[in-house]
Image (cartoon, coloured by chain):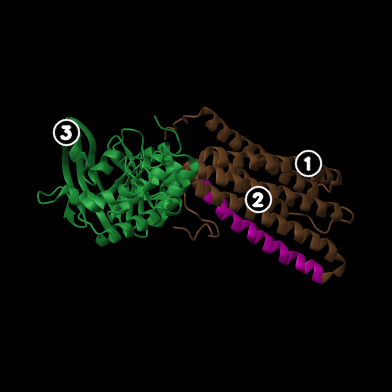
Amino acid sequence: MENTLIITVENCNFYYGTYRALTDVTMGFERNRVTALIGPSGCGKSTLLRLLNRMNDLIDNTRVEGRIFFEGTDIYGKEVDPVEIRRRIGMVFQKPNPFPKSIYNNITYGPRLMGVKKKSDLEALVEESLKQAVLWDEVKDILGRSAMTLSGGQQQRLCIARALAMKPDVLLMDEPTSALDPISTAKIEELIEALKKELTIIIVTHNMQQAARISDRTGFFYLGRLIEYDDTAKIFTNPQVKQTEDYITGRFG
Amino acid sequence: MEERRHTSRAYERELQEVKENLLYLGALTEKAISRGIQALLERNSELAREIIEGDGAIDRLDREIEERCIRLLALRQPAARDLRFITTAIKINGHLERIGDMVVKICEKVLLLNEEPQLKPYIDLPRMAEIARGMVKESLDALVGEDLALANKVRGDDEIVDRLNEQIFRELLTFMMEDPRTIHRALLIMQISKTLERISDHAKGMADMIVYMITGRNVRHETADTET
């Protein structure tokens, strides 16, 4: 069982100053699965997501308690390099945030920093990543054009391609489709389904139908606590905790 | 347990309306079973014809409930308890409509039986009908009260009706062997008995769905005593 889990969170508490955003969260994320984190605004789901690749390090006056293991290594251990963690655990945000550079340079930016210099390697990486993100056919002839000229949906897929170019093991997605139209959303969802063969995906979403459609496992958070965590089909047809039921049936608050 | 109201009052009301319509359909069906058997016992052909004509109301309500459920599924994307309720409502609706059709079949046989002298006094048939009607009623009570024990009782009652049907079959067989002139009437009574047995199967199907609605566990095609 243990080796099917790529990330495990143990008794995790998180504080913004004195405000406790997460309380005693313990959960495991399964390899090559899509796990959705759902819950009302302020429930701690995005906070947890950012903890998984140490993005919260960048916020002042925060504190983590408990332990988070990635492939058996405590990612908050002293010897651990957060940059390396973020390479292996990539992230895609709510609003597409391409660099104001060409499509090509958006993809190669990270790999270049990591030391990939050879042009043919970089070109291969661009093509592979864009194909993985199902964007290649749309942009292969305009790779030199600014990423800012792409549509919102294309920009988001570019951001996914940019994350994939770093060959991550895990992709964290924080409401990746909330700013997109239904067709772009469907493309990203299809992409998530395809990507899970190669990596593990953890997604925060406010769209419950989306969680139901694309995830294998769903965790429901409320007031900083993990209330229920189970197979997605179970959560959406027969949740065991009343708070979960109230939330997913729209009887909350 | 305290019931929370849905954020959307309209949604809450639509769910409630489906439930009320279903109960009304159930009441119509129950009444049809009682009156069908009454037509048999009283040899009342006029009543039998009235019931046959009345089935249209059951069919119309069946369509209306199904349309409401489909609209709820399409527009509200229900989940969990609501989803289980709506899928249960669609299935129960179908069962009730079929029961209505079966009562029509019984009444058609009653009309034929009334053209000939009565073969025998009816003792087990009204018992069967009463149990089957009670199963329909109790299923709907279990739906309203989310009463798992009652739903399971209904599932068990199906056995009693099955046994009565077998008993009637054996009894009628003796009539037919003794006097071939009774065959036509005996066969009609057998068909009525078989139809009542199928009505109780439908009521059991309803109770199975109610167990699913309450617990999320699918017990269809299990007998009441094989479950854990």
Q: Secondary structure at mark 3?
A: loop
Label 3: how many Cα within 10 Å (few below 14, some 14–19, many 20+): few
The percent coordinates of residue B208 (x first, y second) are 55, 52
Q: Residue B176: say if magenta.
A: yes
Quickly name the residue at label 1.
Answer: B54
Q: Nearer the viewer, mark 3 or mark 1?
A: 3
Quickly name the residue at label 3.
Answer: A60
Q: Amino acid at mark 1?
A: Gly
Q: Amino acid at mark 2?
A: Ala
Please report whichever mark, 1 or 2, sits nearer to the chain's N-terminal start.
1
Q: Nearer the viewer, mark 3 or mark 2?
A: 3
Q: Secondary structure at mark 1?
A: helix
Q: Is residue A246 left or right of residue B22?
A: left
Which residue lies at the image location 17% right of the left edge and 30% below the top edge?
Answer: A17
Q: Is residue B144 left or right of residue B7?
A: right
**Chain A is which colour?**
green
Chain displayed in brown: B
What range is drawn magenta here?
A: B149-177
* Name of the residue lying farthest toward the bottom: B177
The answer to whether tags 1 and 2 share a subunit is yes
Q: Is residue A36 visible?
A: no
Give the dominant element type of the magenta stretch: helix, strand or loop: helix
